[in-house]
Image (cartoon, rainbow, N blue to C red):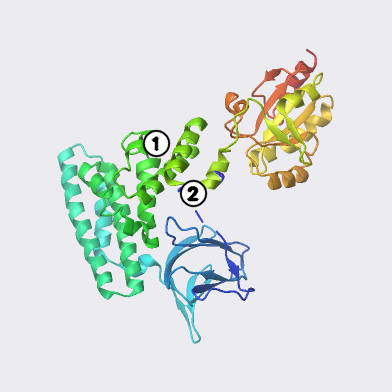
Amino acid sequence: MHKYYFLLAFTFMACASDKTSNTTPRSCKIIFSSSEQVSLQASLAQVLDEDAKSAYSIMPGDTLVIPLQDDWQIVDLSYHNEWYHQVVVAKGEVLQVDKSGIYKLTDTQKEAVKSTTEEAFGESKSRKELEEAEKIITGYKYDDAEKLKQHFRLYLQANKEYYGKLREAFLEKGTAKAKILADVVLVEQYKRLWAVNEVVQDSATTALLKSDMFINEEHFRNRNLSPLFNQFTYYNQIKNAGNKTLVEKYKSDYVSYPEVIQAYFKRQLIINMILKKYDRKSIISHLDNYIAEYGPNKQLEQWMKEIEYGVTESDDLLLTDANNKKYTWQTLLKQHKGKVVYVDFWASWCGPCIGEMPSSKKLHQDLKDVVFVYLALNDEADAWRKAMERHQVQTHSYLVTNSKSSNFVTGHKITSIPRYMIIDKNGKMNNPDAPRPSSTEIRYLLKEVMNM
């Protein structure tokens, strides 16, 4: 799962094809055209506790109907890392997307769609002046602390006035779209305050950013304001603001918030503990406490699989072959006793691992008396089976089914792959971190162990 990034924990989940007739009345349609064989990524603004599917991958030529939760909703669109735009769509709208941009189709015309940034801020002179003020604060090394505070106070006042007036203007309009744009304004204000305050470290502003002015239950239920909570999580947990450990934050940082917000932030803490590779026993202890206090949670389920929650720790490796026959590391050692064994820890998703496969097969051809054992680590069964066949490593090939709960993995500090080991004829570890098959020295090392 960490093959991907975060935060973010970073995010995003499926869609209905135009070929199906069972379309949702509250929906929009996206027509994707491209001469390149690239995908269009689309994700909907989502309430943080919502289980509805929110992310879509669309291929050229596809027409997709995306169900909306509201009559007006924010959609993020990304074209093959070339551009990213956030737009507001209404139910029943038809969008055509290509490399040049996003267009709304009607019976009579094709109209370019503005991003939320363009609609909310336009060519605002005040916004540009704020950006320049931010650059001065974040990019200049102040020798005079009082001068820095003075610049910051002026910036805070300008920030409050500009974003406050702009947001009020949208709210006064009272339309559904204007309310969404008011939320877009608040999100930008919050993000910019965090970024500038990260440099200044003003305690009053830090308290404001954590206060119920921004972090409250009404905002938590507003899908357009979920970035406020993502931003809070980034600065309070990922950057570890305040120099507290995640465990300390779990105990003390969220007691003043409503229960639903406490639960959300504590979930993010546990996820970040997993990503930062905290001790597994500590993570499981926090998961147990979380479930006892708040009950099971779907968002945590996949992350619980990531650490093999519920699996008892073992000093052994638990293995399965392509026919689902079960083995352990110890039974393999007994099976191959009297032979030198060269162990290859790899995975279907690991590019460097795959890159070593031709060298591994060549080495095996030259050293036929050495047993080559392939152990897939942190992999998924279907992907492993396909990769095993594709790269022709079916013999002595196994999937490790307790990658996260095996003391063998942690004890030998197998934190990255590919990783190789040499086992001698007596079944004893000779080299726990052996050279790769493509290296010049591995051939000589294996021959040396064979002659022992």
Q: Residue type at mark 1?
A: Leu
The residues bearing labels 2 and 1 have C-alpha atoms spaced at a distance of: 20 Å
Which residue has dot 1 on it? 246
How packed mark 2 is, by other alpha carbons closer than 10 Å (few <14, some 14-19, many 20 or more), is some
Residue furthest to the top: 452
> What residue sits 32% from the left and 53% below the top?
191
How packed mark 1 is, by other alpha carbons closer than 10 Å (few <14, some 14-19, many 20 or more), is many
Q: Position of residue 219 (x, y in %)?
A: 33, 58
Which residue has dot 2 on it? 297
**Taking 309 as reference, is 91 above or below it?**
below
- The answer to whether residue 277 shows anywhere in this view is no
**Taking 351 as reference, is 96 above or below it?**
below
- Looking at the rendered image, the disc whose residue lies closer to the viewer, 2 or 1, is 2
**Looking at this view, is 331 or 55 the one in front?**
331
Q: Position of residue 172 (x, y in %)?
A: 25, 73
Instruction: Tally the numbered discs.
Output: 2
In the rendered image, which quarter is residue 420 located in?
A: top right
**Looking at this view, is 368 or 91 the one in front?**
91
Q: Earlier in the sequence, mark 2 or mark 1?
A: 1
Q: Position of residue 288 (x, y in %)?
A: 48, 38
> What residue sits 15% from the left and 46% below the top?
150
Q: Callout 2: helix, strand or loop?
A: loop
Q: Position of residue 120 (x, y in %)?
A: 32, 67
> What residue sits 75% from the left and 23% below the top?
333
Q: Residue type at mark 2?
A: Asn
**Looking at this view, is 335 or 416 the one in front?**
335
User: Mark number for residue 149?
Assistant: none
Asked if residue 241 lies left or right of residue 297, the reply is left
Q: Callout 1: helix, strand or loop?
A: helix
The quadrant the N terminus occupies is top right
- The answer to whether residue 188 shows anywhere in this view is yes
